[in-house]
Amino acid sequence: MASRRNIKGMLHNFLGTHTSRYSDFDGYWLFGLLVDDIRELYIDLIEVRSECNDTMPMIIAKQLAVTKFSEQMEKVGLPTSCIREAHLKITKSPELIDGFVNGWLSSGYQVKLAVEAVTDLGKTYESTLSLFVALHNPKVEQRSGRALDNFSKY
């Protein structure tokens, strides 16, 4: 069994995995589809809780966060009983800013992700990540081939 000292690194890896290009919806980066609809999003990482007014990208983001968190715990060998509570808070800057996506100047937001986990012993661990998230633009973005692969299964 892994040591609880691995929790900080696990949280860092979770943020990197959750914001990777592999977090997609219909072949497009999930965060680009989600960013315009949120100001702040709070996700319980132990249990998926969707609201009736959640958009499909928001539902996918919540489910994906719970799955990726669980996978990262498994990778470091931490049993779920070690974590009493865990949550992810996603906030975006209030102002639209410009940044580059695939060599194109795009409008988007600065987004901060903060993950916090409380162990069964009451110790709190945190990790944060900030990144630029452009508004979804299919003219600039490259669609993942995974969406087409998933579609062909049906």
Image (cartoon, rainbow, N blue to C red):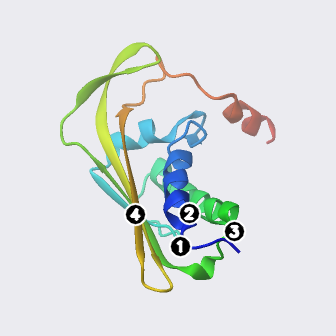
Q: Residues within 10 Å of mark 2 (few under 14, many from 20)?
A: many
Residue farthest to the left, as pictured: 95
- Ranked by sequence position, the earlier of labels 2 and 4 is 2
Nearer the observer: mark 2 or 4; the answer is: 4
Q: Percent from the top left, x then y, of residue 97?
A: 23, 28
Q: Residues within 10 Å of mark 3 (few under 14, many from 20)?
A: some
Q: CA distance from mark 3 to mark 2?
A: 17 Å
- Tell me the amino acid under the disc marked 3: Gly
Q: From what the image shows, is residue 86 above or below residue 141?
A: below
- Tell me the amino acid under the disc marked 2: Val
Q: Would residue 52 be seen by someone viewing this image from the given angle?
A: no
> Dot 2 corresponds to which residue?
66
> Dot 1 corresponds to which residue?
47
Q: Percent from the top left, x then y, of residue 5?
A: 54, 69
In this rendered view, identify the residue nearer to me: 82 or 38. Answer: 82
> Dot 3 corresponds to which residue?
77
In the shown orientation, is residue 6 left or right of residue 105?
A: right
Hey, which quadrant is residue 6 in on the image? bottom right
Mark 2 in CB contact with mark 4 (< 8 angstroms): no
Q: CA distance from mark 1 to mark 3?
A: 20 Å
The secondary structure type at the circle numbered 1 is loop
> Dot 4 corresponds to which residue?
126
Q: Residues within 10 Å of mark 4 (few under 14, many from 20)?
A: some
Hey, which quadrant is residue 26 in on the image? top right
